[in-house]
Image (spheres, helix red, strand yellow):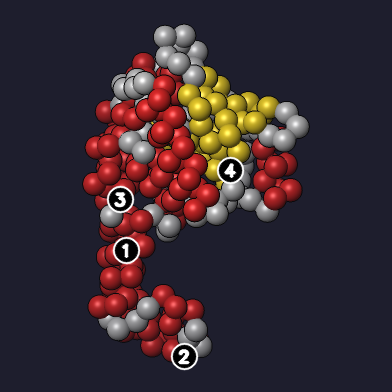
Amino acid sequence: MINISELRSYCHVPTCGDLTAHPRIIKASNALLEQYGFSSERITQMDDEQFGYFRSRAGRNISRVITELKRSIIRNMEVSLSDFPLELLESYVFSHYIIATIDKELSLHVGIESDTLKTLFKENGWNSCAFITAENPDGEIVSDSQNDKNQTALMSELDENNLPYLKGEGVGVNQDWPSESSVCIFDLGFGEALAIASAFSQLAFVWVASDGVPKIVIVGGSASQDIHLV
């Protein structure tokens, strides 16, 4: 029988670098820049001398505050992972995550590198993807009609933000749990993926970095929205 340590090894807990595009980090960064009389747009237009002045006046202070906020988010996610039920985590790890590509189906398995997915990344200039559903929020089974509404809302949001995605399906090994319509979203940061999963009250999602190895990310459902959303 697989033990809890081994199961957790299939999960991804972010680093500070992963959280650059996290909504709370973006909001906090912009607020701090404004407080010091700067903006992200102005910084991109600075020459070396101007940027050196910015760093000496405000940059280090802003970086210190943002780093602590990132660490706070990471600590919360570590607690969520440590408290996550073993049986439920096992079901996420051993589910099949199927992506409907143009010419065939691609099945992702947690912890197993996918050369096919890495080829898809390379062909399209992508570095990562997130396999997310909007169905059955907070791990509670709802009606088919409600799941359809949730999934339509998710795809509409992706279309509005011009995020490329392919439709998919999450199929669990537990026959008592229905398969879930899903999307595999490409060309987004880890922080953005976290925000999407949290906004749709998902307990977890699958994250694949450039190494092509799917990992489970424990989000925490609607209870996570105070942590990940602004």
Residue type, mark 3 in image: Leu
Image height of 168 relative to 32, above or below: above
Q: Do the residues under discs 4 and 2 have CB atoms within 8 angstroms? A: no
Q: Mark 3 and mark 2: span between their CA atoms?
A: 36 Å
Quadrant in which the C terminus is drawn: bottom left
Q: Nearer the viewer, mark 4 or mark 2?
A: 4
Of the residues under marks 3 and 4, which one precedes in the sequence?
A: 4
Q: Please name the residue that numbered disc 1 is placed on.
A: 27
Q: Residues within 10 Å of mark 1 (few under 14, many from 20)?
A: some
Image height of 214 relative to 156, above or below: above
Among the 4 quarters of the image, the one containing residue 205: top left
Dot 4: element: strand
Q: Please name the residue that numbered disc 4 is placed on.
A: 165
Dot 1: element: helix
Residue type, mark 2 in image: Glu
**Which residue is depicted at the point 32% across and 63% down?**
27
Residue type, mark 1 in image: Lys
Farthest residue, direction front: 145
